[in-house]
C-alpha cells in the first residue's frame, strides 16, 4: 500500500526540503501552500528526482481557519475514497510578523503557528487513526525559550514584540504536541516535535534584521543574539529539514511518541515550560475556544 505524506508550507525552504526527503523515502507527497506558481515549481522539483510516486500540490491559505477546514475535508474525503492511508502529517507552517496583526480577531502569530496546525491535526485524526501506524510531526523552534508564557487570554498583556509572540505560539504548539502524544497512546498514531535549529529561510531573512522584534531587555543583547543566529543559519534548509524527515521516517522511532527531535536529528529533552500542566491546560482551553473542531458547517467532525 502506498505511503502518503502531507507537508504544510511545503513549496519552499524547510518544507520543500522535507517533502523532497519524504519523496526520496518512497512517500507520495502532497505539499500545501498559498501560491500556485510556487506549488508548481515545488512539484516539478520533487518529480525531477524521479520519486516512486509523483508529488502534487494543494492550495490553501493556512492563515485562514476556514481554509484549514476545507483542506482537512478534502484530504479526509480523498483518503476515504481511495482507501490509501494518511501515513504522515508534517505541520511545517510558520510565520513571524514584525507588526501586530489579527486574523478574524485573533493575533496572527498565534493563528498561523499554533491554531492552524492544531486544527488541521485534530480534523485529520480520524484519517490518521484509520491509517495507523501513522505519524504527526509538528515543527517547533528554539524561540520557545523567549516566549511570553502567559496563556490566560489569546494575547498576552504588554507591548507586541514579534520574537516573543512567535515563541509563545510555538510554545503553545509544543505543549499541544506533547499533550496530544499522551492522548493518542495506544492508537498507533505517533506524535513528534521537530526542531530545525537555525536555517536561513524567507522568514528569518525578512525578520531578524528588524531591531523592533524583541523587548527592550533583550534588545540590549540583540546584536550578539543576531550574530549567533546568523552564524547558525549559515547551514542549508536541507540540513534543517533532517529532524522532520527523521521524525517522519526513522524506523527506530516506530512505536515511540512524545519525543522532540533536535537539530542533530536525535531525541532531546523538551523545553520545560511545554511540560507544565498549567500551560498545557491553558493552551487546550484557548485552542478549543478559538479553533473549535466541531464548526457549525462541519458537524461530521464531532466526537
Image (cartoon, grey):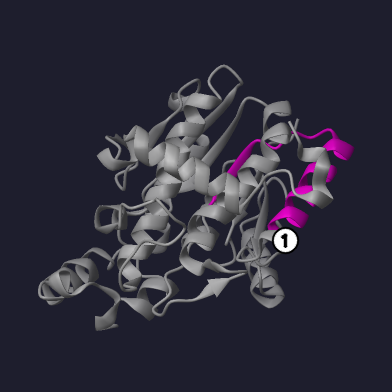
Taking the image as shown, residue 113 lies to the left or right of residue 235, namely right
Give, as a single range, the part of the protein colored magenta. 67-91
Relative to 39, say whether 195 is above or below.
above
State yes or no: residue 75 in magenta.
Answer: yes
In the orientation shown, which residue stands out farthest toward the top? 186
Q: Is residue 221 visible?
A: yes
Q: Quadrant of residue 204?
A: bottom left
| Magenta residues, dominant SS class | helix
Q: Residues within 10 Å of mark 1 (few under 14, many from 20)?
A: some
Image quadrant containing the C terminus: top right
How far across and down, in percent of the image, does residue 12 sit? 54, 67
Q: How many marks?
A: 1
Residue at the image point whose x is 50% and y is 20% from the top: 255
Relative to 29, say whether 229 is above or below.
below
> Residue under circle 1?
66
Taking the image as shown, residue 197 lies to the left or right of residue 203, namely left
- Secondary structure beneath dot 1 equals helix
- 215 vs 177, nearest the viewer: 215
Amino acid at each position: 500500500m502506498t505511503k502518503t505524506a502531507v507537508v504544510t508550507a511545503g513549496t519552499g525552504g524547510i518544507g520543500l526540503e522535507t517533502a523532497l526527503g519524504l519523496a526520496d523515502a518512497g512517500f507520495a507527497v502532497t505539499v500545501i501552500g498559498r501560491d500556485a506558481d510556487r506549488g508548481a515549481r515545488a512539484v516539478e522539483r520533487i518529480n525531477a528526482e524521479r520519486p516512486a510516486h509523483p508529488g502534487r500540490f494543494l492550495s490553501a491559505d493556512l492563515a485562514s481557519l476556514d481554509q484549514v477546514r476545507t483542506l482537512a475535508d478534502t484530504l479526509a474525503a480523498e483518503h476515504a475514497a481511495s482507501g490509501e492511508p494518511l501515513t504522515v502529517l508534517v505541520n511545517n507552517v510558520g510565520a513571524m510578523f514584525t507588526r501586530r496583526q489579527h486574523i478574524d480577531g485573533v493575533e496572527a502569530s498565534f493563528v498561523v503557528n499554533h491554531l492552524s496546525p492544531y486544527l488541521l491535526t485534530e480534523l485529520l485524526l480520524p484519517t490518521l487513526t484509520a491509517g495507523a501506524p501513522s505519524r504527526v510531526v509538528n515543527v517547533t523552534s528554539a524561540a520557545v525559550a523567549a516566549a511570553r508564557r502567559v496563556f490566560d487570554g489569546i494575547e498576552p498583556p504588554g507591548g507586541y514584540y514579534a520574537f516573543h509572540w512567535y515563541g509563545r505560539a510555538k510554545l503553545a504548539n509544543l505543549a499541544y504536541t506533547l499533550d496530544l502524544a499522551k492522548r493518542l497512546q495506544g492508537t498507533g498514531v505517533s506524535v513528534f516535535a521537530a526542531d530545525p535549529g537555525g536555517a536561513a529561510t524567507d522568514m528569518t531573512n525578512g525578520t531578524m534584521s528588524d531591531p523592533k522584534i524583541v523587548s527592550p531587555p533583550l534588545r540590549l543583547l540583540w546584536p550578539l543574539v543576531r550574530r549567533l543566529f546568523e552564524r547558525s543559519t549559515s547551514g542549508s534548509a536541507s540540513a534543517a529539514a533532517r529532524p522532520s524527515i527523521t521524525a517522519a521516517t526513522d524506523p527506530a522511532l516506530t512505536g515511540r511518541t512524545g519525543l522532540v527531535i533536535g537539530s542533530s536529528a536525535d531525541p532531546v529533552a523538551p523545553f520545560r515550560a511545554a511540560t507544565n500542566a498549567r500551560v498545557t491546560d491553558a493552551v487546550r482551553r484557548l485552542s478549543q475556544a478559538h479553533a473549535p473542531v466541531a464548526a457549525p458547517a462541519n458537524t461530521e467532525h464531532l466526537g
